[in-house]
Image (cartoon, grey):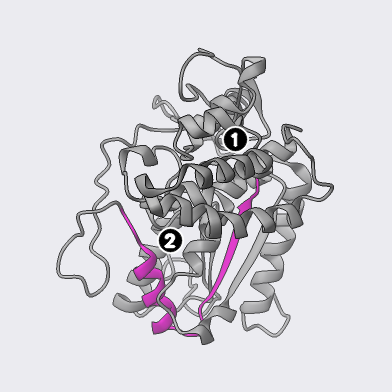
């Protein structure tokens, strides 16, 4: 691409969304370190670099409590949006900062104790969780204080037989089975996917004049993906889920001028916004490189651009990031 379009001396950026964020982290390492291609920046939207942090099914990985902890602020944002809190705070962001401190403090300490957690402390934590994410105390106690994203999506509005979204928890729809433990579909996908499929097919055929008998698939089954990865300097692929945090950290140290932009939606339970913050604050980089990372948050979900106000905000933030980092002296 760089040779074909004569772009070797142009500013260079990677933009990854969702599964594109681990790809971007792995690719920037490969391009910078192995191919000697310098980049100005990497833009991440709805980030997941360490798949052990996924909030979808952490119950299948017992002993790893972080997914529950870093998903809690997104659950709190969702309960706030749906007016499902026993006492609704006036402003979202200060409320979420309080939840973040609780999640990484008292809540994390309680989960770390496992079966040794005193009953009185367990009830106290459940009561605080009820205040923050709206689920009933008996439910939280029965769940051992561990609520996955899919459990939360099914339970928050279950008294109304409603399920909240996964990619964007502002959406809700009728529960497929109100007695089930987990959400059985994503109301956000049900509401908007057909519009995106129609728009893409129309654009490809009418605007680009691309003719094919192939079917456009908006999503695929990822259960058969090869999810093993060999990080930089590791002797083998690790027997854990994909974690490309070492790749991004290596690239940032290899090129100390590389800038990172993180964009997250408060109402995203597929890749919770606090997960991205946590990953960036646990990169193995010198503290002097922390200043190379920007954080931007939106009152939207995984697909930030679904909310028009945040589409405009995201666009403006990306433009500003590029102009700050393109080294063109304002000529871009």
Q: Is residue 255 above or below residue 147?
A: below
Q: Position of residue 244 (x, y in %)?
A: 36, 62
Q: Is residue 275 left or right of residue 264?
A: left
Q: Position of residue 305 (x, y in %)?
A: 67, 45
Span of residues in magenta: 242-267
Dot 1 surroundings within 10 Å: few (below 14), some, or many (20 or more)? few
Q: Is residue 215 left or right of residue 149?
A: left
Q: Nearer the viewer, residue 198 or 258?
A: 258
Q: Is residue 197 visible?
A: no
Residue at left offset 38%, top offset 33%: 220
Q: Nearer the viewer, residue 131 or 260?
A: 131
Dot 2 surroundings within 10 Å: few (below 14), some, or many (20 or more)? many
Q: Secondary structure at mark 1?
A: helix
Q: Nearer the viewer, residue 15 or 151?
A: 151
Q: Which of the 4 image quadrants contains residue 291? A: bottom right
Mark drawn on residue 203: 1
Viewer-nearest of labels 2 and 1? 2
Q: Is residue 164 above or below residue 63?
A: above
Q: Is residue 298 above or below residue 171?
A: below
Screen quadrant of the C terminus: bottom right
Residue at left offset 46%, top offset 30%: 142
Q: Nearer the viewer, residue 70 or 241?
A: 70
Mark drawn on residue 24: 2
Q: Is residue 259 left or right of residue 56?
A: right
Residue at left offset 73%, top offset 41%: 307
> Do the residues bearing badges 2 and 1 touch, measured as CB atoms within 8 Å?
no
Mark drawn on residue 286: none
Q: Position of residue 156 (x, y in %)?
A: 62, 28
* Residue 260 covered by magenta stretch: yes
* Residue 252 covered by magenta stretch: yes
């Amino acid at each position: 691409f760089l040779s074909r379009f004569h772009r070797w001396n142009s500013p260079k950026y990677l933009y990854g969304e969702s599964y594109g964020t681990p790809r971007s982290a792995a690719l920037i390492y490969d391009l910078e370190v192995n191919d000697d291609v310098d980049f100005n920046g990497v833009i991440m939207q709805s980030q997941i670099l360490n798949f052990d942090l996924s909030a979808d099914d952490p119950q299948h990985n017992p002993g790893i409590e972080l997914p529950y902890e870093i998903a809690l602020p997104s659950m709190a944002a969702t309960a706030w949006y749906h007016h499902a809190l026993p006492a609704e705070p006036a402003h979202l962001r200060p409320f979420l900062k309080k939840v973040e401190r609780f999640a990484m403090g008292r809540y994390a300490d309680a989960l770390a104790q496992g079966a040794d957690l005193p009953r009185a402390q367990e009830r106290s934590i459940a009561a605080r969780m009820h205040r923050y994410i709206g689920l009933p105390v008996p439910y939280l106690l029965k769940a051992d204080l561990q609520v996955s994203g899919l459990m939360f999506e099914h339970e928050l509005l279950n008294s109304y037989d409603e399920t909240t979204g996964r990619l964007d928890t502002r959406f809700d729809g009728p529960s497929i089975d109100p007695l089930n433990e987990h959400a059985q579909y994503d109301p956000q996908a049900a509401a908007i996917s057909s519009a995106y499929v129609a728009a893409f097919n129309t654009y490809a055929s009418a605007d680009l004049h691309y003719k094919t008998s192939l079917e456009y698939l908006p999503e695929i089954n990822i259960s058969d993906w090869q999810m093993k990865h060999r990080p930089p300097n590791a002797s083998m692929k690790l027997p854990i889920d994909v974690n490309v945090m070492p790749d991004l950290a290596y690239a940032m140290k290899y090129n100390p001028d590389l800038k990172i932009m993180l964009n997250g939606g408060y109402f995203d339970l597929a890749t919770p916004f606090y997960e991205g913050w946590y990953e960036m604050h646990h990169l193995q980089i010198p503290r002097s490189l922390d200043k190379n990372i920007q954080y931007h948050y939106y009152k939207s979900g995984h697909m930030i651009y679904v909310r028009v106000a945040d589409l405009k905000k995201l666009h403006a933030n990306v433009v500003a990031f590029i102009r700050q980092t393109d080294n063109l002296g304002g000529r871009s």
